[in-house]
Amino acid sequence: MKKILNEMKLRLPAISTNAQVARTAVSAFVAELNPTVEELADLRCAVSEAVTNSIVHAYKEKEDKSSSFVYISARLYNTREVSVEVSDNGCGIADVALAMSPAYTTGDSLERCGMGFLVMQSFTDLLTVKSRVGRGTTVLMRKFLAPAGDDEGCD
Ligand SMILES: Nc1ncnc2c1ncn2[C@@H]1O[C@H](COP(=O)(O)OP(=O)(O)O)[C@@H](O)[C@H]1O
Ligand SMILES: [Mg+2]
C-alpha cells in the first residue's frame, strides 16, 4: 500500500532568489530516498522551472508584491515516488495547452524561451497543470525513483 514517508510545505515570497531556495530545499528533502545524481538533477531543474514561472509570470501585474507567495508542497512515498506541487495565487493562465506548447512565451523574448513546461514534462514522470484566470496556478509533478541500490546514491 502507498504510504507517505515524509512531507514538506514551504511558503516563499515570489522573489527571484527563491527559485534557488526552493530547489535546494527539495533536493535536501528528497535525499532521504537516496536518489541518483541524475534523478536529483532532474527534480531540481523541474522545481526551478515551476517556481521561476510563479515568480516571473504569476505576479507580474501586481504592484504590491508583499502578499505574493509561491507555495511548495512535497511528499515522499514508500513506493519511491516523489510529488512536488508548486502553486501561486497569481494571474493564472487562460489557455494551459497553449502555454505548455514548446517555445510559447508571454515573457521578454530575450530572457524567456518558452521551454519551462517542456523541461518540467521531460524531467518528471507526470505533470498536471491547473489554472484559473485571476485565481492562480498549480503545477503538480510526480517522479518515480529507481529502486534503491540500482545505482550509486547521491547524498
Ligand atoms: N505560474 C504562472 N502564472 C501565470 N502564467 C504562467 C505561469 N507559468 C507559466 N505561465 C505562462 O506560460 C508561458 C510558458 O511558460 P514556460 O514554458 O515556462 O516558458 P517561459 O517561462 O520561458 O515563458 C509563460 O510565458 C506564461 O505566459
Ligand atoms: Mg518558464
Image (cartoon, rainbow, N blue to C red):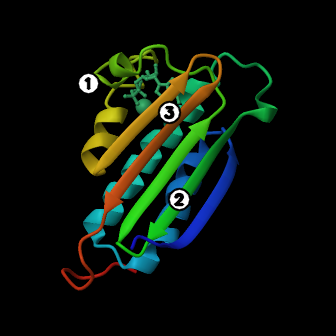
Q: Amino acid at mark 1?
A: Pro
Q: How many tags in the picture?
A: 3
Which mark identifies residue 53?
A: 3
Q: Badge 1: how crowded within 10 Å, few (<14), some, or many (20+)? A: some
Q: Residue furthest front?
A: 1
Identify which residue is drawn at 58% across, 56% down.
21
The image shows residue 31, relative to residue 50, as above or below, that is below
Viewer-side residue, 80 vs 114: 80
Expressed as whole percent of the image width and height from the top left, the position of residue 45 reads 38, 50
Instruction: Locate the C terminus and report the quarter of the image it occupies.
Output: bottom left
Disc 1: residue Cβ within 8 A of ligand 1's nearest atom: yes
Expressed as whole percent of the image width and height from the top left, the position of residue 70 reads 64, 41
Expressed as whole percent of the image width and height from the top left, the position of residue 130 reads 48, 31
Which mark identifies residue 102?
A: 1
Badge 2 marks a residue whose secondary structure is strand
Comparing labels 1 and 2, the label whose residue is closer to the camera: 2
Instruction: State the residue position of label 2.
Output: 74
First of labels 3, 2 by sequence position? 3
Residue 64: which quarter of the image?
Answer: top right
Comparing labels 3 and 2, the label whose residue is closer to the camera: 2
Marks 3/2: CA–CA distance: 18 Å
Badge 1 marks a residue whose secondary structure is loop
Disc 3: residue Cβ within 8 A of ligand 1's nearest atom: yes
First of labels 3, 1 by sequence position? 3
Badge 3 marks a residue whose secondary structure is helix
Identify which residue is drawn at 34% across, 25% down.
100
Disc 2: residue Cβ within 8 A of ligand 1's nearest atom: no
Marks 3/1: CA–CA distance: 15 Å
The image shows residue 65, relative to residue 76, as above or below, that is above
Expressed as whole percent of the image width and height from the top left, the position of residue 16 reads 60, 40
Identify which residue is drawn at 31% across, 51% down.
124
